[in-house]
């Protein structure tokens, strides 16, 4: 099955090619034991923050299953995939007939990754299972992430999950499982992954050869919040400068604050700035949500409600702007003005 490399961050290793995973030893052990018991669930919901290794874990487990198709004779641990093994080579080349990786497709007209996993992509799973496996091996579908399924696609996946084929395995990834259809969640075994601890972050970043600026190391690790993807966006996409500018903007007032708004809006509307734009929107959503929760815990319910409503309003505004391809700079200026008002 064709394997797209689109969407892989600069400096990252595509999960299908990554032979190392850090910080999730317990989850790996659980999957290995569950599979070896012969009583493993046909669908596992691997959930947790973005960029902590969910997709890498899914491909490691898929490699394990395809290499040891008989659960009773499989090792009791997930080994690092051997890049020279035929299974690994097939997966890396996208040539395995036993694995389907569903993710947002690339728009042939624009060359950019689409905003959602559509029902046409999910239909590939139907064709995938309809094919006869020449090896009689497992058939594995990785949905990466299921958060990107639009409603029609989610309903189509649900139908397959309700009546899974024999020797079928679904590895469903999610950054925000609360947004998934409850019926999809109910048909999956949840496996929660935590943010990487400092040691695991150091190991993962060292593997990527990511050099953190000495004067910003502590700031980057704090802002990364245990996510390798966030660390890459902070360092390789200028995210740390954007967030520092946002903090300075929130602390400023008058003309100085307005100047910082334009600086941020310029950076986020630059050509090929989709990654840092999405990163900042995620940060802004977290900031507003955290502020609302903090105020609510202090008993300041009026201001907590204000920030909660502001978060909802801004998300709606950004959704509309993206749908109608409105001017990014002006949209971001409007958003920042609302935040500082």
Image: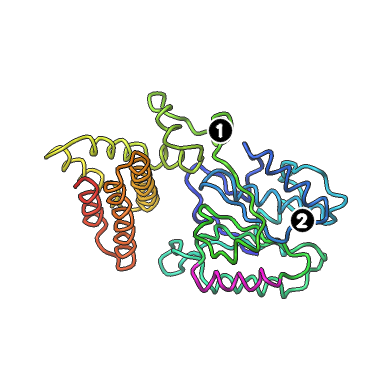
Majority secondary structure in the magenta region: helix
- Outermost residue toward the top in this view: 214
Q: Whole-Å distance between the Cαs marked 2 and 1?
A: 28 Å
* Residue 9: mark in rendering: none
Q: SS of the residue at dot 2?
A: loop
Mark 1 packing: few (<14 Cα in 10 Å), some, or many (20+)? Answer: some
The residue drawn where x is 27% and y is 46% is: 303
Residue toward you, 167 or 130: 167
Instruction: Find residue 85 and report its horizontal and vertical position in percent.
Output: 76, 48
Please name the residue that numbered disc 1 is placed on.
197
Q: Name the residue carrying label 2.
A: 40
The correct choice, above or below, for 318 with respect to 61 in the image is: below
Q: Quadrant of residue 214?
A: top left
Badge 1 element: loop
**Residue visible at 68% across and 55% down in the picture:** 91
Residue 177 image position (x, y, % from top left): 54, 56
Position of 262 with respect to 160 (left or right) is left
Report whether 179 appears left or right of 34: left
User: Which segment did they paint magenta?
Assistant: 150-163
Evaluate whether residue 238 shows in this view: no
Does residue 3 appear left or right of residue 66 in this picture?
A: left
Of callouts 2 and 1, the N-terminal one: 2
Picture coordinates of residue 86, whole percent (x, y): 76, 52
Q: Is residue 116 visible?
A: yes
Q: Nearer the viewer, residue 178 or 293?
A: 293
Quadrant housing the N terminus: bottom right
Q: Position of residue 310 (x, y in %)?
A: 28, 53
Q: How many marks?
A: 2
């Amino acid at each position: 099955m064709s394997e797209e490399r689109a969407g892989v961050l600069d400096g990252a290793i595509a999960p299908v090619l990554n032979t190392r995973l850090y910080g999730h030893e317990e989850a790996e052990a659980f999957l290995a034991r569950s599979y070896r018991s012969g009583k493993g669930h046909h669908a596992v919901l691997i959930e947790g923050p973005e960029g902590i290794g969910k997709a890498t874990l899914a491909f490691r487990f898929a490699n394990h299953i395809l290499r040891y198709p008989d659960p009773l004779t499989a090792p009791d641990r997930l080994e690092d995939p051997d890049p020279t093994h035929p299974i690994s080579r097939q997966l890396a080349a996208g040539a395995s007939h036993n694995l389907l990786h569903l993710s947002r497709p690339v728009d042939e007209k624009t060359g950019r990754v689409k905003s959602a996993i559509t029902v046409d992509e999910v239909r590939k799973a139907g064709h995938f299972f309809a094919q006869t496996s020449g090896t009689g091996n497992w058939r594995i579908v990785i949905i990466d992430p299921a958060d990107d399924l639009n409603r029609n696609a989610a309903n189509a996946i649900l139908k397959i999950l309700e009546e899974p084929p024999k020797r079928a395995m679904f590895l469903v990834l999610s950054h925000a499982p609360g947004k998934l259809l409850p019926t999809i969640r109910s048909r999956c075994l949840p496996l929660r992954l935590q943010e990487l601890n400092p040691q695991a972050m150091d190991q993962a970043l060292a593997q990527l050869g990511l050099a953190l600026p000495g004067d910003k190391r502590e700031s980057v690790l704090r802002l990364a919040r245990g996510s390798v993807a966030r660390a890459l966006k902070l360092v390789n996409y200028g995210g740390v400068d954007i967030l520092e500018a946002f903090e300075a903007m929130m602390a400023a007032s008058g003309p100085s604050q307005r100047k910082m708004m334009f600086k941020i809006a310029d950076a986020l509307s630059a050509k090929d700035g989709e990654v840092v734009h999405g990163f900042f929107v995620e940060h802004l959503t977290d900031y507003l949500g955290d502020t609302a929760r903090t105020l609510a815990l202090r008993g300041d319910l009026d201001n907590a409600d204000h920030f909660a409503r502001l978060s909802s309003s801004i998300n709606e505004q950004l959704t509309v702007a993206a749908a109608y391809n409105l001017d990014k700079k002006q949209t971001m200026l409007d958003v920042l003005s609302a935040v500082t008002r």
